[in-house]
Amino acid sequence: MTSGSGPSMKWSRRSVLKGAGLGVAAAAAAPLLAACGSSGGSGGGSASGSSKKVIIGSFQDPAMAPFRDKYVKQYQQETGVQVQYSETSYDAWYQACKSDGLNKTGAYDIYVMDDNWVPEFAAGGIVQNLDKLGLKVNPDILSKGLDQGYWPPKEGARLKAFKNDTPALYSLVIIDDVNLLYYDTRHFSSPPETWDDIYTAMKKKAHPPQLYGWSARGVKGNPVVQTYLPLLNSYGGNFVNDDWSPGFAGPEGVAALERLLTFLPYMAASTPEFDTDQETSLMLQGKCMALTEYTGTAVTEIDNPSDSKVVGKINMATTPKQVKNGPAIGTFICGIASGSPNTDGAVKFLEWFTSDRIQTQFAREGGNAAVTKTALNDPQASQKYRWLPAIAQSVQLSTPKPRTPDEPKFEDILGTQLNLALVQALQQKGGYDQIAQKYLNVAKGQMQAVLEQNKNIYF
Amino acid sequence: MAVTTAPVRPSEPGRRPDAGRRAGLDRALPWLLLLPAAITLGLVSVYPIYAGVHASLTTYLYGRPVAGAGLKNYTDTWHDPVFWQAMEVTLKFVLIAVTVETVLGLGLALLVANVVRGARWIRMSILAPMTVAPVVVGVIWRLIYESETGFVNPMFTSLGLGAPNVLSHEGSAFFGLVLVDVWEWTPLLFLICLAGLQSIPQEPLEAAAVDGAGPVRLFFNHTLPLLLPVLAVGVVLRLIDAVGTFDQIFVLTRGGPGTATQLISIYAYNTAFNFTDYGHGAAMLIALLAFAFLLVLVALSLMRRAAKRVAQ
Amino acid sequence: MNRAGRYARWAAIALVIVGSLFPFLWMLSVSLKRQVDIFGGPSLPKQPTLSNYTALFTQYHFGAYLVNSILIVGASVLASLLIGTPAAYALARFRLPRGLNGQALFAALLVRMVPPILLVVPFYIILAKFGLLNTRLGLILLYTGINTSFVIWIMQSFLAEIPTDIEDAALVDGDSRLSALRRIILPLASSGLAATAIFAVITTYNDFLIALTMTSTPAAQTVPVGISTLIGKIQVEWGPMAAGGIIGALPILIFAFIVQRHFVRGMTLGAVK
């Protein structure tokens, strides 16, 4: 029973609420009718009426900005073919295009993919065989970048079901995103070539926190693995051996991790939480001597005054050497959807974008990570964008990651232990070789468990 | 504020008029009223649960179901040490966070209950965190904790203490996450307790105070027992939701450092989507559903027991 | 309460308000900074700029996200109230055979307990089958379903508390059950409706996972999804992200401010069990 207020107050409250309720109802009803009518943009299912349209989907990334803002429109102007481009967040896009491809819903012609999706998408029939579609590959495309699109891979471990297959092209590289060494020319008179060069320089000059010797991504999983791979590869270690057994827990891998841990006294104490933006911000603020990172930092940030305080002062080279150089490569790569309504149009678009003319333009206007040899070594482009030759060199020296749909899981396993190794090394400040061995062994054991669980795919 | 304090009433059929036609309509009426809701709910719950169970009993390859797996996904999950670690983290997180939120929410409600001046603004300020999307909450706190650009580090160093680098250590990252959840959801418990406090009849309390009972005894002997049923509803709600916390963690730490903040929700999401192992992910999520189910059963029975005690 | 106690109370309240609102201020400060200043260290914006906000609306389609969110939330909450309230009434007023009332309530609660991640793939399949992927209507339908669960659960307890005498009087006077429901019961339960609506609005507006998976372009994407788009593969756009957080929270804050009185009142009616 209501206590207190008399009937008059209750009625006035109720009438206010009723009015509010009616207002809400009215406000919602009209849009409900309207919303039911307009079903929004590209829904799934229906193929485009005109066969002249090409639909491209991608994940949002600064590297894709020129593609989205300029080249899509340029293709329309040059050929009259309409191109529809949409992008969304990385995780959302991965699921969206995977579902679209698995169910052949046909909402897209071209998927812009991350490099490590290729094994899953190719093996799963989510993207089509480009050789069979008659795509003519530009012979000037750097071979190591192009190889990322082949399934099964031309070198390295293969899944059991594909062991004896001939590699075919399932996706075409459009941006050669590869590890580079970034170094501050104020602290290095010549490009450092080996890890020892880097270490000697940082011992001499670095004084955290005003000047760090090295900066790295430390977050568990994929980020910290990107930090580790250039080291691992350069020491001659493998992520996985040709028989899929984990290779990083051997002497080379341990030595590589130990090397990284020796840099820690000259790095930020909060490295375990660093992702790309924190890692590069140290350099962009002028507080870091050197680091390894992919090409995006060069192309979009280093010389941009609203991002960088060191415009013109950072140079790039291929990642340092121990027994060899070993930059990791992670291209932006395009596949044609299994349910694509316009495969011819898609093929023509991809051939156009990777042609000499367009790639040279891509390099000249903005210093983007083009994929052809001439574009990256074009004198006009490299004069303005000094990182392009470094990209070309890095691509041909690069080491691919394991080609399996489980690769993200492997990165998560290894990356969790690498992250823990960083945390402990920061506390302990010594005994780095033991720390390295300990955590790499744990990662090796976990990875072997995963391989064992799925052994019918691998062995 | 006018408020009903009607005790629990079991559903009674109202007195039915005698007209035969009326009686027929009345017998059919509840089913007619229930039908649209039953269909709607059926579509959104029955099919997903069936699909989830079905997926958990299937082996997937490259995203496609390829074979029945029997209980293999469940046994694999049972033997997966990372799964149990995530369970442990989830349980610790849920129990600590919800306890703190409840105590704090109750305390805040007691603090604010009798304030009249500026009550609306005070309530709004306390409620504000709850109205913000979890993704945004994750972003705000990432900015605050972030070592180079955040607030926490400079605050500590200006006091002469070392920079904590909250997100770089396992322990501090975990409790940093708890703090975020407490900031975001204490308002819910506050609201529930405030509403509960305002529905408690004042006369028994005033009588006891006249009899000489101090504020502490008043609270524990009189207020709290009446508040328990209300409190339990809020706690159940929070327990269920806390188990599924995902967005904030993803933005803050991705489950790191190591696995310090890797709740089941994160691990299952990665397994189901990013690691393309949908069968295992589904098995983990079904296990999570069963876990939430049990929690609700326990909480509801506790609630019923408390309500019975109050009725004495 | 004596003077010292009163001061202590106000000091505590002030502390709580600061702790509650401070993160918002921090976010505001970041939203007004340029990228290079954001990583220059914590401070007030040296060169405040509105570029993050303009970027939101020009580059990142935030206007579309806001429109979508408001439309989708409004429609789905309204629909779920329309579907759920009669069902709640049925469960509150009629004793169904074989203890079905309790089971029905628990079944209604079930969908709330299912981890959203588990809902996502089946939902995707359903929407794909009907061509409703990346549409506002698709999301409206899904959210209506989920909200109905919550509506039934809460409204049932509100309606059960309204005494049957009023209703019976109307029935004796010749009203049908349905018109009694409409004319008499609903106005009495309007505060419960408002409270339910508020909870549903907040929960639906803030949903991330379902909206993320069912949509792919700004034609149907909602505010939380739009905000997450700013989390790129390697990098977060902090400035626009902070601006997005502020703008995204505004509709909810305004909504909550308008109805928060009814909020507290409504909770009371339904919560006491």
Image (spheres, coloured by chain):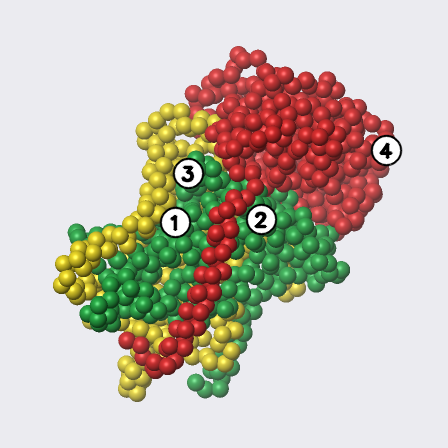
* Rendering quarter of residue B140: bottom right
Point out the tag, 1 or 3, that comes first from the N-terminus: 3
Point out which mark residue C222 bears.
none
Can you tell which chain is drawn red? A
Report how far apart the C-alphas of labels 1 and 3 lie in the structure: 13 Å
Q: Do labels 2 and 1 share a chain?
A: yes
Q: Which amino acid does label 3 sit on?
A: Ile
Figure colour of chain B? yellow
Q: Which chain carries label 2?
A: C
x, y percent for residue B312: 20, 71
| Label number found at residue C126 | 3
- Disc 3 crowd rating (10 Å Cα; few below 14, some 14-19, many 20+) is some
Please rate how many residues cluster around mark 1, counting C-alpha atoms within 10 Å: few if below 14, some from 14 to 19, many from 20. Answer: many
Which is more N-terminal, label 2 or label 3? 3
What's the chain of the residue with tag 1? C
The answer for how far apart the CA atoms under marks 3 and 2 are is 23 Å
Q: How far apart are marks 2 and 1 (CA)?
A: 23 Å
Query: Which residue is rendered at x = 79% and y = 24% of the image?
Result: A374
Give the residue number, with chain letter if any, for mark 1: C145
Residue C53: x and y in percent read: 67, 56
Say if B51 sits above or below A349 in the image: below
Give the alpha-carbon distance from disc 4 to disc 2, as whole Å: 38 Å
Locate residue C254: give its quadrant: bottom right
